[in-house]
Image (cartoon, helix red, strand yellow):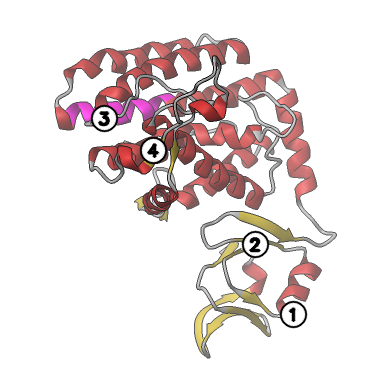
Amino acid sequence: MPVLYLTEQGSTLRKEGELFLVTKDDQELQKVQAVKVEQVVVLGNINLTTPVINYLLQEGIDCVFCNSYGKYHGRLLSNESKYGLLRQSQMETISDTHRKLAIAKEIVRGKFLNQRTLLMRYRRENDISSLDTAIRTFEDGLNKLERVADIGTLLGVEGNTAARYFEAFKELLKKDMGFNARVRRPPTDPVNSMLSFGYTLLAYNMQSAVSIVGLDPFLGCLHVTEYSRPSLVLDLMEEFRSIIVDSVVLRIVNNNILTEADFERPAPSTGSEQGEQGRMVALTQAAIKKFVHHYEERVQTVIQHPVTGHQVNYRRCFELQARQVGRVFLRQEATYKPFLVK
């Protein structure tokens, strides 16, 4: 057990001899050998005793603090931090054009394959023959990936294929809520509003995963490095967008969980121009709570991991992908393997 996850709210991590004990209300919940623990991840309202904290600091064991939903708050670090080499390797990788492009291609390939899987599933279950053209578009996009020689061209292929994907996405919606294409800044219809909000939640979750692993969230391979842009977070989100957020939005719309009444629309403008706020369609506070509930339900869904075969939830999969790209940065693995669904 290299990573000890503490999830039981109100519990306490203690150290007795060579053991870590997790207790609550005088009951022992878990017992592990302290020497086998390489990292502690605290999720929510959980106590650590002073002997535990001293041991973690003395042994240079990283301890990460998140809220109960997995949002990263901070970490307990000693002078024995192990992340210098990891971040140096990350910097070296993104400075190496060939290695950076190889990882970026795999990220886009994972995104394409998962989007195609979503369309194929709806095509099969709902007999929507009009999706066939869009599905074939992904074959063309995947073939073009093999010939891409630089990040700029790769982003062009990704952007064109994304546009075709969202054209097809409209056909998966059983209700017309004004969605015609992906509109980001600002979202001008309820579906785009939910997509934008969902991607924001996904970014928070992925940034927590990246921070837990110890990677620099601002140094990525696919997305351009810019001031305050968490490029690596945006990279690792790509293969999960359709799996998590798009799936949640389709479920909410197609099951009438949220309706037009759950969104705040801009008042008619009397001026000749409207700013972003004047065009934005936003979820009401009640709708936000409903959306978050269904989003959390999705990320907590337990699946069999396609590589390890272990039963894990999607939130844990975010972290496993971050750990894998870290191993690629360190040259412990040759190729990044995106998370793929069937």
Residue type indicated by callout 2: Phe
Task: In the rendered view, tell whether residue 68 sits above or below residue 290.
Answer: below
* Residue at the spot of label 2: 65
Q: Secondary structure at mark 4?
A: helix
Outermost residue toward the left? 127
In the rendered view, would you say 187 is above or below 35? Answer: above
Q: Which residue is mark 1?
A: 50
Which residue occupies the extreme right position in the image? 79
Q: Is residue 188 magenta?
A: no
In the picture provided, is 171 more to the left or to the right than 206?
left
Residue that numbered label 3 is attached to: 173
Residue drawn at point x = 53 percent, y = 63 percent: 68
Let me know if residue 333 appears in the view: no
Q: Quadrant of the C terminus?
A: top left
Residue drawn at the location 37% of the way across and 15% of the way down: 164
Among the two numbered marks 1 and 4 on one chain, the one whose residue lies closer to the N terminus: 1
**Residue plotted at (76% across, 52% down):** 82
Q: Confirm or deny contact between disc 1 and disc 3 (CB under 8 A).
A: no
Image quadrant occupied by the N terminus: bottom right
Q: Dot 3 lies on which element?
A: loop
Which numbered disc, 4 or 3, marks the residue that appears first in the sequence? 3
Q: Check disc 1 and give the amino acid type.
A: Thr
Side of 215 where 170 appears, left or right: left
Residue stretch rendered in magenta on the structure:
112-124
Cα–Cα span, label 4 and label 3: 16 Å
Q: Residue furthest front?
A: 270
